[in-house]
Amino acid sequence: MLSFRLSPLLFAILVTIVLAWAGAAAQARKQLIAHRGASGYAPEHTAAAYRLAMEQHAEFVEPDLAVTKDGVLICLHDDALKRTTNAAEVFPQREPWLANDFTLEEIKRLDAGSWFKPAFAGQRIQTFQEAIDLVRGKAGLYPELKSPELYRSRHVDQVKLFVDVIRKNGLDKPESLKTTPVIIQSFDEEAVRRVAKELPSIPRVLLVERDGDVSEPRLRVIKTFATGVAPEKSLVAQHPEMVKQAHALGLTVTCWTFRADEKTTFASVRDEMAHFLYDLGIDALFTNNPDQFPRR
């Protein structure tokens, strides 16, 4: 039998090459999630913001999901329509303008662009189905179930509506996930646990913003129903050890939210994102400014 031995120098060189390759591969896997679309440059959750996010090479577009009075999932961050539409002008007598008090037909009458900039006048709130049709095959979808407790209190099964849309579109199928990856997120543990049972093929991320949620014991609990954890970025800055702890448990770590218009100790939002991605080692992040993502 032919055998050989590597010299210590050659062995060291090979180890260095392998580690460098592994490091480069890990960096290549860093993921950019466009927060409400490219919301630093276009009105959040409009088709314009989603298209721009894809043009700026986002791996994922993030639709926040609310529910209309007639049971349709729409892309909206707030429970109410007032901040990002002209609902108060069109329906002055219907304060506080909760989206769940309006039908889809009524919501489609609203201008969702002018509040951001006059050039976007006429942009409309999208349904989740419209967002799927726009993004599918071009980027991934990273939907957030917003305010599940609100809908539970109104006897609206938001999770079922979400599961039904995902299944109707076949987005939980392996062949679809290859071209249009989907990751579901929520602050609501009950909702994430339910999705884990009903859509086991879809990765699930629990959003957190409390110190106790990034402790190792809590991360162990999160691992039982989620595939990742998404702490507010200040938590990771204060508890950088949680990244390795989460990774050791097989959890991904995704931080939010990075915005160019926020004053921080960093020279730019690009520098801030680079620190979290490459120094602290997180896997992905949400940003309003996809074009500033520091790829390496």
Image (spheres, grey):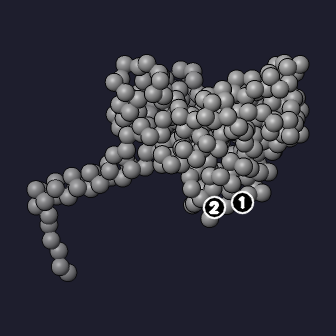
Per the image, the residue denoted by label 1 is 170
Q: Secondary structure at mark 2?
A: helix
Tell me: 295 left or right of 126: left
Residue in view at x 77 percent, y 57 percent: 168
Dot 1 amino acid type: Gly
Q: Residue furthest bottom?
A: 1
Q: Is residue 257 above or below residue 168?
A: above
27 or 70: nearer the viewer: 70
Q: Secondary structure at mark 1?
A: loop
80 or 213: nearer the viewer: 80
Percent position (x, y) of residue 284? Answer: 48, 40
Q: Residues within 10 Å of mark 1 (few under 14, many from 20)?
A: few
Tell me: 78 left or right of 138: right
114 or 136: nearer the viewer: 114
Q: Quadrant of residue 10?
A: bottom left
Of pointers 1 and 2, the one earlier in the residue sequence: 1
Percent position (x, y) of residue 92? Answer: 85, 20
Q: Quadrant of the N terminus?
A: bottom left
* Dot 1 and dot 2 residues touching (CB under 8 Å): yes
Percent position (x, y) of residue 278? Answer: 35, 37
Q: Quadrant of residue 114?
A: top right
Residue 199 shows in this picture: no
Q: Is residue 178 above or below residue 214?
A: below
Percent position (x, y) of residue 2? Answer: 17, 79
Q: Which mark is residue 63?
A: none
Residue in view at x 72 percent, y 42 percent: 126
Per the image, the residue denoted by label 2 is 176
Residue 39 shows in this picture: yes
Residue in view at x 61 percent, y 48 percent: 141
Dot 2 amino acid type: Ser
